Image (cartoon, grey):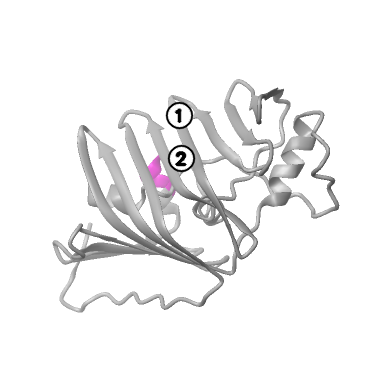
Amino acid sequence: MNKLLSYFFLILILSSCKTKVREIDYSKTPKNAKELIARVNSKNKIPEWLALKGKVNLIKDERDVTLNINIKFRKDSIVWASISAPFGIELFRTMLTKDSVYYINWTNKTYFKKPISHISTFLKADISFKEIQEMITANPNILKKAYKFNLVEDTFELRDKQASYKVSADLYRILNASILGGDNELIYEFSDFTNEADFIFPKEFKLKVKSVENFEATLNYSKIVFNEKQKLHFKIPISYVEAK
């Protein structure tokens, strides 16, 4: 369970390279999927630094636990995360770089360092550091495909055989999505958006993975800080044993 907690935010999501920035008239309603995708992807803004604090509720194999979470992020460089028990005792810490994954389990005094490809092995799906970065910063791009396009009240809907998206008609942010990959299904949802420092960011993030092992995570952020340099401490004690 501990390793799963370490990776709960590392998920499979199809994405494409960001659309080249150009002038878009957001006052005009998009007429088709291509225009909507251009608006969504152009709204994606990844901060240089991001700090998130809150709680995460995890459900797996009928086990339900709520813990404290602390995430620190530096663009194109590092993702650092710590999970603590309700009374503040840190259970484990993990750090990702473009080429490596680091993990410390304070409970059983173990650690490991593995290549970033270990994430794909663990999830049984390909995922890059870039895709992890986009999800943590709530900026997943929509793959350019021939979707069915609909406007239902104040929500745009895109759908094909493998993916569906719902997009806010006023924010042009993804509200929820469902992505199929073989026998696996990923469902995620962003809600309770706030606009701080010119960043539109959700205070709540829900993730559900339907596979051989089902898994659900709900994050509620009580503190969000943009573009303030963070301390990223990660030191493995000499006495700790490397996990196999």
Which amino acid does the dot numbered 1 rest on? Glu
Q: Residue at x 71, y 31 (%)?
A: 145
Residue 133 or residue 152, whichever sits in front: 152
- Callout 2: few (<14), some (14-19), or many (20+) C-alpha neighbours within 10 Å? some
Residue 1 is tagged as none
Looking at the rendered structure, the secondary structure element under dot 2 is loop
Is 213 one of the magenta-colored residues?
Answer: no
**Nearest to the observer: residue 109 or residue 58:** 58
Give the residue at mark 2: 125
Q: Is residue 157 above or below residue 75?
A: above
Residue 24 position, x and y percent, is: 83, 48
Q: Is residue 57 left or right of residue 207?
A: left
Q: Residue at x 53, y 31 (%)?
A: 179
Residue 123 covered by magenta stretch: yes
Q: 98 or 135, which is in the foreground?
A: 135
Q: Quadrant of residue 242?
A: bottom left
Counting from the top left corner in percent of width and height, residue 96 is at 43, 63
- Residue 18 is at least partly visible in this image: no
The residue carrying mark 1 is 185
Q: Which span of residues is magenta-colored? A: 120-124
- For image coordinates 56% across by 71% down, the residue present is 227
- Residue 236 in the image: above or below residue 32: below
Report crowding for label 1: few under 14, some 14 to 19, many 20 or more residues within 10 A (C-alpha): some
First in sequence, mark 1 or 2: give its number.
2
Q: Position of residue 144 (x, y in %)?
A: 71, 36
Residues under labels 1 and 2: Cα distance?
11 Å
Pointer 1 and pointer 2: residues touching (CB < 8 Å)? no
